[in-house]
Amino acid sequence: MRPFRVVATVGMVADVVRAVGGDRTEVAQLIGSGIDPHLYKPTRGDVAQMLGAEIIFYSGLKLEGKMGDAFARLANSGREVHALTEKLGEGYSLHSPASAQHTDPHVWMDVQGWMTTIGVVAEVMSRLDPKHASDYAQRAATYRAELEALDHYVREVIATIPDDQRILVTAHDAFQYFSRAYGIEVYGIQGMSTESEAGLEHINRLVDLLVARHVPAIFVESSVADRNVRALVEGARARGHRVAVGGTLFSDAMGKPGTYEGTYIGMIDHNATLITRALGGTAPRGGFQGKLEGMP
């Protein structure tokens, strides 16, 4: 029997599907490295791939905002369309400070929260392919154990950052789940969706924060333009405080395909290790599995 044709939206979703589905799935990823899913519009080729797929997995919570109508139409036509965040427990989700109506979609930043997606994929695959249900269950258990170890690593290294320096300022508001899970203050220049623009007043408040609390480093993101981060650096410098750009974090997209950072584990390892080292904590240059390269 040939593998299931599966379409996944972002890399984090595709990674879970490949980990659980193994050689029983043939996964096509629509939104690539460095591309912002908040603003992504499906192409004709994307639509053709979804129409030809047997299963479609997406993250949900409006991460893929401009694709929502397409998902709804496909689901209404009887196709297997599933949001990986559909099994999050009641009260888990965070919301935008500006509006309780806007749910924060960046669940993968909390490894424990993202682990719930493993069960969604395993359940769907086992229902459609009961003959191999035990294989899906075994792969799910293996991947869950790997993520448990990753979660422990992130907690351990973030805790080494001095309390007064445990402040993460980054390009957009994608790290609130990371903040809650790992005990670090987080401030985004733009809102949860990169469609929102950062106002001058908000920029000035963040400059005040950097100066008053002597924040040593702030971060750009791979899928977001860095102009607002540069504005903060210049604003702080004009006030006599030199703040470094600590490096590039992966927020809405993973690293390049074929690299360690192009996996979910590598993405989170990179972020946690880079943040820790830039803010004065202690983390091995090679990260969680010794696979990181080019880490300052």
Image (spheres, rainbow, N blue to C red):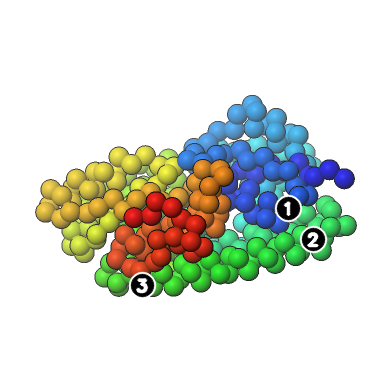
Q: Earlier in the sequence, mark 3 or mark 2?
A: 2
- Horizontal side of residue 165 vs 193, given as left or right: left
Residue situated furthest top in the rendering: 44
- Rendered image: mark on residue 148: none
**Residue 32 image point, x, y percent:** 55, 39
* Residue type pointed to by label 1: Gly
**Residue 81 image point, x, y percent:** 71, 46
- Asked if labels 1 and 3 touch by Cβ distance under 8 angstroms, the answer is no
- Residue plotted at (62% across, 51% down): 15
Asked whether 132 or 36 is in front, the reply is 132
- Horizontal side of residue 88 vs 49, given as left or right: left
Q: What residue is pinned by disc 1?
A: 22
Crowding at mark 2 (Cα within 10 Å: few <14, some 14-19, many 20+) = some
Q: CA distance from mark 2 to mark 1?
A: 9 Å
Q: Earlier in the sequence, mark 2 or mark 1?
A: 1
- Rendered image: mark on residue 160: 3
Q: What residue is pinned by disc 2?
A: 135
Figure quadrant of the N terminus: top right
Q: Secondary structure at mark 2?
A: helix
* Residue type pointed to by label 2: Asp
**Residue 49 image point, x, y percent:** 70, 33
Q: CA distance from mark 3 to mark 2?
A: 39 Å
